[in-house]
C-alpha cells in the first residue's frame, strides 16, 4: 500500500493565493500520485478557524521576607467553525489504483468568520486538514494547509455614527497683563469612516487671541490593539502604532486662521474583527497642539473606522480602487451578502498554551470509522488511471463564540470594532489616492 504517495499529496486551492472573503465558497482538490494500489477506510477533510490569545507575565510574591518570582500564563481561545467532510464509498474499504488522483473539495466559509489576523499576543488563523485512515483504523496520515480570510466591511451598512462628522474643540485661556485671553481651535472631519487610499480632509479653524504662539499642530492616524485573556481574566494593550502623520506650521498670536489639511489613509487591509471577542483592533485620529514657552501641550483623539467599501456620501466620479487590490480575494463583493455579527455564547474551551502557529490545533476531534454520507461528487483522475469516489456532504457548520468576561474593576473593553452592521445600502465606489508618508511629532 502506497501510503508515502498520500503523505506527499498536495492541497491545491482553485484560488492559488488561498485568500477568500467570509461568506465565499472555497474549492480545490487533493492531488496524490500513487505507485501501487492503496486501500483506505476513509478520507476526511476538516475546515477549522479559531482565535487564540496568549502571553506570560512575571509576578513577584513576598512572604515572610522571602521573594519568589512566578510566571503567570494568560490565554483565551474561541472557535469560529469546525466542519468535516467524509470521502468514501459505502461502508467498506476503498481501493485507489496506481496513478494520479484528484479528490475535489469545497466549503462555504461562514459569513460570521472574522478576518485573519496575527498580532503581538494573539492570532486568528484558518486551516484545512486532510486525514486518511487505513482499513485497520490505526494509521492516520495528515496533510494540511492554511488559508486567509478577509471579512469585508461595507461602511454604508454600519450604524449612523460612522457617517457623522468628527468635531474636536480645544479651548484654553492664557493670562496677560490685561487679563486672560482665549484660545479656540476646532478640528473637523466630514465623517468617521474611511478606506485605505482615501484622503481624509481635516479642517482647522483657529482663533488665537492670546500672546502665546502655537508652534505646530500634529495629526496622527494610529492603530491600537487589545488582547483579552479568559484564564485568568485580564487585558493586554501594546503600545499604539503610528500609521500616518501630518504636521502644520505655526499659528502666531493674535491671529485667526482657517486651514485644510489632507491625511492619506495608508495602503493596508484593515482587519474586520467584529465577530472576535478576544482581540480588538481600533484606529484613531490623534490631534496634538504644541504650545510655545512653558505652556502645556493640548491633545485629543477620536476613533475612526477603516473599512473595505467607502461611504457613498464621499464617492467621486471615478470608482474606488483599493490600493492593495492585488492582495484581496478575487470574488466580487457584490456576490456576497452582508456580514452579520454573531452573538451566540458558548462555554469556554480547554486548550494548551499557544507555542507557535504550526501547533495551533493540537487537540483533534476523533473521526468516525465509517462514512454515513450519501455520494454526490467524484474524484477526477489523471491519464494514468484512478477510481471514482463520491464526495460527502458537510457534517457540521457550527460557529462557537466565546464572550470574555471583564476583569474585576475594569471597564468593558470588548466593544466591537468598527460597529454594528445593518443591511440598507448598496456598495459604492470612491477614487483613492495612495500615500505612505509618515513623520514623527
Image (tube, rainbow, N blue to C red):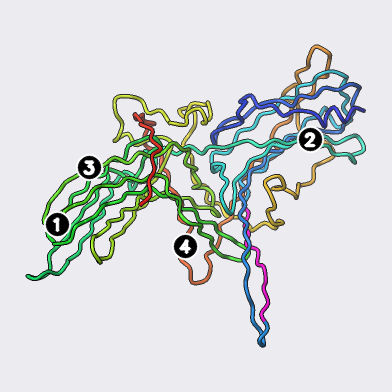
Query: Which residue is at the far left?
Result: 178
For the stretch drawn in magenta, the main secondary structure is strand
The image position of residue 282, as x and y in percent, is: 44, 50
- Residue 253: mark in rendering: 1
Separation (CA) of disc 2 from disc 3: 66 Å
The image position of residue 394, as x and y in percent, is: 69, 35
Which mark lies nearer to you, 1 or 3? 1
Please name the residue shown 30% across and 44% down the image: 191
In the image, residue 370 sits, relative to residue 97, either above or below, namely below
Separation (CA) of disc 1 from disc 3: 19 Å
- Residue 260: mark in rendering: 3
Relative side of 38 to 231, left or right: right
Q: Earlier in the sequence, mark 2 or mark 1?
A: 1
Q: Which residue is mark 4?
A: 412
Relative side of 386 to 394, left or right: right
Which mark lies nearer to you, 2 or 1? 1
In the image, residue 410 sits, relative to residue 441, either above or below, namely below
Which residue range is magenta in the image?
67-77
* Neighbours of disc 4 within 10 Å: few (<14), some (14-19), many (20+): few
Q: Secondary structure at mark 3?
A: strand
Q: Earlier in the sequence, mark 1 or mark 3?
A: 1
Q: Which residue is mark 2?
A: 372
Which mark lies nearer to you, 4 or 3? 3
Relative side of 132 to 203, left or right: right
Q: Earlier in the sequence, mark 2 or mark 4?
A: 2
Please name the residue shown 31% across and 58% down the image: 300
Please name the residue shown 38% across and 32% down the image: 426
Q: Does the residue at mark 4 contact the one at mark 3 (Cβ under 8 Å)? A: no
Separation (CA) of disc 2 from disc 4: 45 Å
**Which quadrant would residue 138 be assigned to in this image?**
top right
Amino acid at each position: 500500500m502506497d501510503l508515502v504517495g498520500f503523505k506527499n499529496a498536495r492541497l491545491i486551492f482553485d484560488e492559488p493565493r488561498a485568500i477568500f472573503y467570509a461568506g465565499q465558497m472555497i474549492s480545490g482538490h487533493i492531488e496524490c500520485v500513487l505507485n501501487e494500489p492503496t486501500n483506505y477506510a476513509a478520507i476526511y477533510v476538516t475546515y477549522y478557524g479559531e482565535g487564540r490569545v496568549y502571553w506570560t507575565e512575571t509576578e513577584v510574591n513576598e512572604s515572610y521576607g522571602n521573594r519568589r518570582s512566578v510566571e503567570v500564563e494568560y490565554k483565551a481561545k474561541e472557535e469560529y467553525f469546525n466542519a468535516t467532510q467524509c470521502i468514501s464509498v459505502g461502508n467498506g474499504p476503498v481501493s485507489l489504483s496506481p496513478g494520479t488522483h484528484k479528490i475535489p473539495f469545497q466549503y462555504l466559509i461562514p459569513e460570521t468568520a472574522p478576518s485573519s489576523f496575527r498580532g503581538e499576543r494573539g492570532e486568528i488563523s484558518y486551516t484545512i486538514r486532510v486525514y486518511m485512515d487505513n482499513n485497520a483504523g490505526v494509521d492516520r496520515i495528515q496533510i494540511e494547509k492554511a488559508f486567509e480570510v478577509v471579512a469585508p466591511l461595507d461602511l454604508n451598512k454600519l450604524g449612523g455614527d460612522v457617517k457623522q462628522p468628527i468635531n474636536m474643540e480645544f479651548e484654553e485661556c492664557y493670562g496677560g497683563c490685561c487679563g486672560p485671553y482665549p484660545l479656540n481651535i476646532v478640528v473637523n472631519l466630514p465623517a468617521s469612516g474611511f478606506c485605505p487610499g482615501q484622503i481624509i480632509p481635516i479642517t482647522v479653524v483657529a482663533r488665537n487671541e492670546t500672546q502665546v504662539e502655537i508652534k505646530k499642530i500634529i495629526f496622527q492616524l494610529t492603530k491600537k490593539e487589545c488582547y483579552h485573556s479568559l484564564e485568568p481574566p485580564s487585558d493586554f494593550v501594546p503600545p499604539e502604532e503610528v500609521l500616518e502623520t501630518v504636521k502644520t506650521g505655526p499659528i502666531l498670536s493674535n491671529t485667526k486662521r482657517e486651514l485644510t489639511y489632507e491625511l492619506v489613509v495608508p495602503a493596508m487591509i484593515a482587519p474586520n474583527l467584529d465577530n472576535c471577542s478576544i482581540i480588538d483592533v481600533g484606529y484613531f485620529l490623534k490631534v496634538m497642539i504644541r504650545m510655545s514657552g512653558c505652556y502645556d501641550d493640548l491633545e485629543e483623539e477620536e476613533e475612526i473606522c477603516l473599512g473595505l467599501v467607502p461611504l457613498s456620501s464621499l464617492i467621486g466620479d471615478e470608482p474606488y480602487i483599493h490600493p492593495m487590490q492585488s492582495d484581496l480575494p478575487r470574488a466580487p463583493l457584490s456576490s456576497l451578502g452582508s456580514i452579520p455579527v454573531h452573538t451566540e455564547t458558548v462555554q469556554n474551551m480547554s486548550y494548551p498554551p499557544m507555542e507557535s502557529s504550526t501547533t495551533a490545533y493540537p487537540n483533534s476531534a476523533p473521526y468516525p470509522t465509517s462514512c454515513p454520507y450519501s455520494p454526490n461528487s467524484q474524484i477526477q483522475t489523471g491519464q494514468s488511471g484512478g477510481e471514482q469516489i463520491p464526495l460527502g456532504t458537510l457534517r457540521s457548520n457550527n460557529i462557537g463564540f466565546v464572550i470574555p468576561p471583564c476583569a474585576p474593576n475594569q471597564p468593558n473593553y470588548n466593544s466591537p470594532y468598527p460597529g454594528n452592521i445593518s443591511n440598507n445600502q448598496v456598495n459604492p465606489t470612491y477614487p483613492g489616492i495612495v500615500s505612505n508618508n509618515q513623520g514623527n511629532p
